[in-house]
Amino acid sequence: MTLRLLAKPICCALIFAALALSSARAADPSPAAVADARTIIMTSGIVKSFDAVVPQMLGVLERNALATRPEIKDKLHATLLKLEPEFMKSEDQVISAAALSLAKRMTDDDLKATAAFFQSPAGKKYVEAQPAALTDIVAAMQGWQQKLSTDMMTRVREELKKQGIEF
């Protein structure tokens, strides 16, 4: 579960980092460009990260509240389930902001092509494969970081030892 939670922010970070590197466009994109960007947000898997925010936050609220007030468990849970749709409505604001941000950073043609890709069978397959692939990538990165840390310390010690310094 931890890797899956890490994979979502990494996915979003990678996508937005790539967007930042793409060519900038006018400050006020057309409504059609924003619509295409919204399609990308909705079909690329980015929206899944947004979808998880409210339930995760309500879960944290519930765990924290129950730590001190376990006697209200059933009523609190029912209340949170009742209120969840109300809070989910606010997700549209972040989707709109993400679409506008994306539309400002890509040309109309690039937006159309990207939206078409994510709506294509290959794009849908990519989105389907992405969570498992990101979990694997995060695991590979963690292993690499651990090995790199050990290798760095070993090499630094070797180099300092050549200079007569025990480290």
Image (spheres, rainbow, N blue to C red):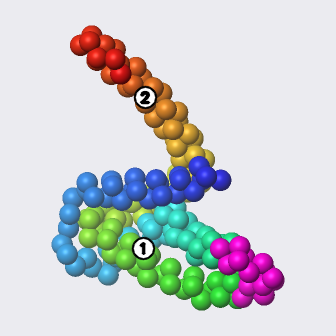
Which range is magenta?
A: 64-79
Q: What residue does disc 1 label? A: 38
Location of residue 112 in the rendering, given as x and y in whole percent from the top left corner: 36, 65
Say above or below: 98 vs 123: below
Q: What residue does disc 2 label? A: 148
Location of residue 144 in the rendering, given as x and y in whole percent from the top left corner: 47, 32
For the point 44% across and 59% down, the residue is 12
Say above or below: 38 vs 133: below
Q: Residues within 10 Å of mark 1 (few under 14, many from 20)?
A: many
Majority secondary structure in the magenta region: helix
Between disc 2 and disc 1, whose residue precedes? 1
Could you give the CA–CA distance between mark 2 and mark 1, rounded to whole angstroms? 39 Å
Location of residue 26 in the rendering, given as x and y in whole percent from the top left corner: 18, 72
Residue 127 visible somewhere in the drawing: no
Question: Is-magenta flag for residue 144?
Answer: no
For the point 44% across and 82% down, the residue is 93
Location of residue 137 in the rendering, given as x and y in whole percent from the top left corner: 52, 41
As drawn, is 48 to the left or to the right of 41? Answer: right
